[in-house]
Image (cartoon, helix red, strand yellow):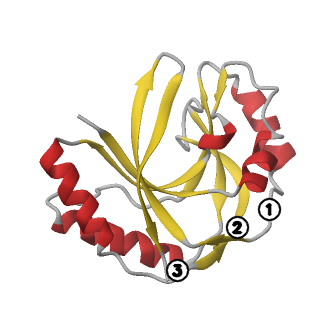
Amino acid sequence: MPRLFVAIDLPAPVQEGLAAMFGGLPGARWVVPEQLHLTVRFIGEVDSSRFRDIREALGEVRGHHFSQHLEGVGFFPPRGRPRVLWAGVEKNEQLLQLYRRIEAALVRAGLEPERRKFAPHITLARLRNTPAARVGRFIAAHSLLVTADFAVNQFVLYSSVLNDRGAKHYVEEVYPLS
């Protein structure tokens, strides 16, 4: 069964700029630069008929292209041992509208509504026993991160296969924005 998610790809210069920050954190498993993306909605494993329904429902999502940029860094969870290091996403009403349209389409296709609040971010690394002080220094060193604006003119349905080195993503469908 495919494991699916909906994402917005980052342009290569933004991926490369983020990757230039990678390093200096023991226990960090950095995301492969070409797989850096903004997850709009994680779907999970689905059977083949649900997969078809999802592809069709996402094809009905309409929206306009817009500009976006990244700003700041942080970690999840906000309390306790840091487990995920992320780059922040500028607050953007157009991104929020796109999320709502995608979410509504997926619910119409039979998925349960997302219970978590939409917290747009780019996962940079997964952390394992990384000292909190080191994470704090990394965040302080990169707290002023702001990327150039980039165009968001499509979103992508991906499948993901987990292996011992992380996940490998495969494009299932690309949905253009007008």
Give the Cα distance between marks 3 and 2: 12 Å
Q: Which residue is mark 2?
A: 69
Would residue 71 be visible to someone looking at this image? Answer: yes
Q: In percent of the image, x 75 and y 55: which residue is there? A: 14
Q: In percent of the image, x 51 and y 73: which residue is there? A: 95
How many callouts does the rendering have? 3
Give the Cα distance between marks 2 and 1: 7 Å
Residue 3: x, y in percent?
32, 39
Give the Cα distance between marks 3 and 1: 19 Å
**Disc 2, disc 1: CB below 8 Å?**
yes
- Give left or right: position of 24 versus 157: right
77 vs 146: above or below: above
SS assignment at label 2: loop
Residue 26's disc is: none
Q: Which residue is mark 3?
A: 94
SS assignment at label 3: helix
Near-viewer residue (159 or 39): 159
Amino acid type for the residue under numbered disc 1? Val
- Which of pointers 3 and 2 lies earlier in the amino acid sequence? 2
Q: Which residue is mark 1?
A: 146
Q: In percent of the image, x 13 and y 49: which residue is there? A: 49
Amino acid type for the residue under numbered disc 3? Gln
